[in-house]
């Protein structure tokens, strides 16, 4: 091989007639150049045959572009999601063709349903081999079409620049989402005359944000001003739109009780005086109960997921629905809106704030307080401050809150621990709650935690998982071993696939069909990867163990043995309306 | 919410990109909605394609579907119409044995009655053509079955929307202001022997 700058050297052509300087470079170089021009600093990826030319070009820029070598492509994409969710930047993933590309599919689906901006670049076999079942060939474009916001296959290097510019524009604008660009190996190797990279800010068939209709903003303000029992429910749209401040102004001026979806959590401090808690199947008691009593429901940047609404024909039928969303397809999708307010909430919220009256709703608020008191007495107190028996998941989160002052990034997996963490974690700043909300992907937390640490290096990142999810991407301990991101790994082990077991107990006559999962000694596994760890079983050891985990200068794995057959309550049983929420299993 | 299922004709204007048929088709298959008819062809404006799709579904379902299809990056606009809002046609070809049809039918009367045309006349077979709606095409089919029909084919629906002025002018304007970027197709598929491979 020749010189270091193998990909971009050769010649700089100064055509006498040309005004711009063109360089003869490889397609792979144009990929790297696009990333640099898009201010990408971190890539999560895994090399392989069909993406080798891009990795070769990356070799010259390994200082500018921090490439994290994961242990599985699924780990790469979840890490990119974690990175994006804490930082607000677009996550970037490299993977090779065939199995490398198909391993991204779960992460793409997760990012699609949770609206996470990603640009995934996959290598592909030579263009002349497409359709021949070549080694490591797979039709990744058609495989990923339903789980990407946009995807495109490049077979000619001259397209790489414009296509990547489009990719970054599409991923980040409007309702964000994952984009996959598949580049055949010949295009990566092809030499071309290259001009400057140009960012994309317009695609003629794509309208990122809908036009704001002033008359609907006015109608919404009127409805809010006339409401006796208004209720705000908001989702991740507030975070994705960087509209936390605008939202806070709106909420505080309106004085309306406010609840969040799991994806919206942390956009406002969880202890804000107007905050009444989380919505949904395992959300707080009051917000679910009073969804069916409010007279105006103001939904902001949320999509009425079935886990939030329960039975649709029993969801807020009495209320006038105001729905603010950037995606017109979300309006009327699940819940019919009386007043649709299309647009980016960063724009529409200030318009609305301007028009509403400054108010408090003390009597209405009192009802939420009373509901909270019932929930605290029956559920929260015994769960967070138990005095006997084995450790509960809730008390682990409670001590974590104390020790971190609610400043940590909490990354969760899926299941009981996720519901408990999201119910009880205190969060003081936005982009603190990273979880797989829509898709419910087990194995999300560990790689997403790694990515989150790169996205917010100055913050404490705690990846919380159950004993089931812990093993689903456990290979990423290898990534931690090699690159040393300081991620705190907290495994809440109940020796069960707890959420499924809970449903088997409640709805399948306790027939525990394959939910009794056995796990390895997680501390020993961590040790094998050079990661310090500890396991606690006794309440008196818990706090110190958490302190040690948090104070350890590197990654640390703490396994906590928790009660085996605890259930998560309250619960909106499947097929029931939100106000049929129950506090104990006897009430189902 | 209206739950009665009706026939809806969707008219979709798109960029001319590889793979777009799939992106549109999976919107229906994902919801397990079968397509009654699916037509795609270049529109009157260069680089812009027009899809005409017919489904039988409830209004609320179709309404959401339309919004989801409009979200596809390369889609410009989706119109959704009931049958009373459009003029539509299909075309059908019928192959029948010449001998039987000549012996048993007065062909000129048959053609008049069903509004059919003759496309090909050969010693062994004749091909008729009917352009019209489902009933017209079907009734001629039933008629010809009596005379030893050899082959039949029907095209998908094409439709013109009564009310709208279409987007003819606005896409022409757009094409003038922001011309389509040419997509590069795979130039290598037939050059296997000449390409370096590994």
Image (tube, coloured by chain):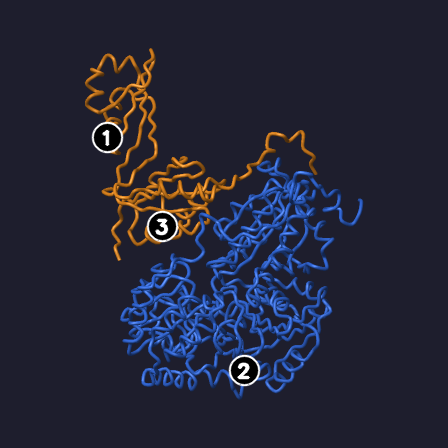
Give the residue pinned by disc 2.
A398
Give the residue pinned by disc 3.
B66
Q: Assign the N terminus of chain A to one quadrant of the image.
A: top right
Tell me the number on the disc at residue B136: 1
Q: Give the chain letter at badge 1.
A: B
For the point 64% across and 39% down, which residue is it?
A126
Chain appearing in blue on the rendered image: A
Q: Please provide percent x and percent y for residue B68.
A: 40, 52
- Horizontal side of A182 relative to A242 (left or right) equals right
For the residues labelled 3 and 2, the Cα–Cα distance comes to 47 Å
Q: Where B20 falls versus A317 (above or below)?
A: above
Q: Judge if badges 3 and 2 mark residues of a common chain.
A: no
For the point 72% across and 59% down, which residue is it?
A63
Q: Colour of chain B?
A: orange
Q: Residue furthest right?
A: A2
Q: Quadrant of residue A78?
A: bottom right
For the residues labelled 3 and 1, the Cα–Cα distance comes to 30 Å
Q: Give the structural element (helix, strand or loop) at label 1.
A: helix
For label 3, the crowd category at 10 Å Cα-Cα, with few meaning under 14, some 14 to 19 and many 20 or more, is: some
Q: Judge if badges 2 and 1 mark residues of a common chain.
A: no
Q: Nearer the viewer, mark 3 or mark 1?
A: 3
Q: Give the chain letter at badge 3.
A: B
Q: Where A20 falls versus A379 (above or below)?
A: above
For the residues labelled 2 and 1, the Cα–Cα distance comes to 74 Å
Q: Give the chain letter at badge 2.
A: A
Q: Please provide percent x and percent y for residue A423.
A: 48, 76
Q: Assign the C terminus of chain A to one quadrant of the image.
A: bottom left
Labelled pair 3, 2 in contact (Cβ < 8 Å): no
């Amino acid at each position: 091989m020749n010189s270091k700058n193998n990909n971009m050297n050769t010649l700089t052509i100064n055509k006498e007639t040309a005004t711009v300087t063109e360089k003869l470079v490889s397609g792979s170089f144009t990929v790297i150049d696009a990333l640099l021009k898009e201010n990408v600093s971190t890539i999560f990826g895994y090399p392989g045959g069909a993406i080798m030319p891009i990795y070769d070009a990356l070799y010259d820029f390994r200082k500018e572009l921090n490439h994290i070598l994961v242990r599985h492509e699924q780990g790469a994409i979840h890490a990119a999601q974690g990175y994006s969710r804490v930082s607000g930047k677009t996550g970037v993933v490299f993977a090779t063709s065939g199995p490398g590309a198909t391993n991204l599919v779960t992460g793409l689906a997760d990012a699609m349903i949770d609206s996470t901006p990603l640009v995934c670049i996959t290598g592909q076999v030579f263009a002349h081999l497409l359709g021949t079942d070549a080694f490591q060939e797979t039709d990744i474009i058609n495989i990923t079409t339903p789980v990407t916001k946009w995807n495109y296959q490049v077979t000619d290097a001259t397209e790489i620049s414009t296509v990547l510019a489009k990719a970054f524009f599409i991923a980040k604008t409007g309702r964000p989402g994952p984009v996959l660009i598949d580049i055949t190996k010949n295009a990566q190797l092809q030499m071309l005359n290259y001009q400057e990279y140009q960012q994309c800010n317009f695609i003629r068939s794509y309208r990122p944000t809908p036009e704001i209709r002033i008359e609907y903003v006015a109608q919404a303000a009127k409805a809010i001003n006339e409401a006796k029992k208004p209720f705000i429910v908001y989702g991740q749209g507030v975070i994705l739109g960087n509209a936390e401040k605008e939202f806070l102004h709106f909420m505080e001026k309106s004085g309306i009780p406010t609840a969040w979806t799991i994806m919206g959590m942390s956009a406002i401090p969880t202890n804000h005086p107007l905050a009444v808690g989380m919505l949904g199947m395992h959300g707080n008691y009051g917000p679910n109960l009073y969804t069916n009593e409010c007279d105006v429901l103001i939904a902001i940047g949320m999509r009425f997921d079935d886990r939030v609404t329960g039975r649709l024909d029993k969801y807020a039928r009495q209320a006038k629905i105001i729905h603010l969303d950037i995606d017109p397809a979300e309006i009327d999708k699940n819940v019919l809106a009386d007043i649709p307010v299309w647009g980016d909430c960063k724009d529409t919220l200030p318009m609305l704030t301007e028009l509403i009256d400054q108010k408090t709703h003390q009597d209405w608020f009192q009802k939420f307080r009373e509901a909270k008191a019932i929930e605290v007495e029956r559920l929260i107190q015994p769960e967070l401050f138990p005095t006997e028996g084995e450790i509960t998941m809730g008390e682990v989160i409670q001590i974590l809150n104390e020790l971190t002052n609610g400043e940590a990034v909490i990354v969760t997996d899926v299941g009981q621990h996720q519901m408990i963490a999201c119910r009880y974690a205190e969060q003081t700043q936005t982009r603190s709650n990273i979880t797989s909300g829509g898709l419910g992907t087990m194995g999300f937390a560990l790689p997403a935690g790694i990515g989150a640490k790169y996205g917010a290096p100055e913050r404490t990142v705690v990846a919380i998982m159950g004993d089931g999810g812990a093993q689903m991407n456990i290979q990423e301990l290898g990534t931690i071993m090699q690159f040393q991101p300081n991620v705190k790994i907290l495994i809440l082990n109940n020796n069960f696939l707890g959420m499924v077991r809970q449903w088997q107990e409640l709805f399948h006559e306790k027939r525990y069909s394959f939910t009794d999962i056995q796990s390895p000694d997680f501390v020993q596994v961590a040790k094998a990867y050079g990661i310090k760890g500890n396991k606690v079983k006794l309440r008196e050891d818990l706090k110190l163990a958490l302190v040690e985990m948090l104070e350890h200068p590197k990654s640390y794995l703490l396994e906590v043995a928790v009660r085996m057959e605890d259930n998560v309550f309250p619960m909106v049983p499947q097929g029931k309306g939100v106000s049929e929420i129950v506090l104990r299993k006897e009430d189902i | 919410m209206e739950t009665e299922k009706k026939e809806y004709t969707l008219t979709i204007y798109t960029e001319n990109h590889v793979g777009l048929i799939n992106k549109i088709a999976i919107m229906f298959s994902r919801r397990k909605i079968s397509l009654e008819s699916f037509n795609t062809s270049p529109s009157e404006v260069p680089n812009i394609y027009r899809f005409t799709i017919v489904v039988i579904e409830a209004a609320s379902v179709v309404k959401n579907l339309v919004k989801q299809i409009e979200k596809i990056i390369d889609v410009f606009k989706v119109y959704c119409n009931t049958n009373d809002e459009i003029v539509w046609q299909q075309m059908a070809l019928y192959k029948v044995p010449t001998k039987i049809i000549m012996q048993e039918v007065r062909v000129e009367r048959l053609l008049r009655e069903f509004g059919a045309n003759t496309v090909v006349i050969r010693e062994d077979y004749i091909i008729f053509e009917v352009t019209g709606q489902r009933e017209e095409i079907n009734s001629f089919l039933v008629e010809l079955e009596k005379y030893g029909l050899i082959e039949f084919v029907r095209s998908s629906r094409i439709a013109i929307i009564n009310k709208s002025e279409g987007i003819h002018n606005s896409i022409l304007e757009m094409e003038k202001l922001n011309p389509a970027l040419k997509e590069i197709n795979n130039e290598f598929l037939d050059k296997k022997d000449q390409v370096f491979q590994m």
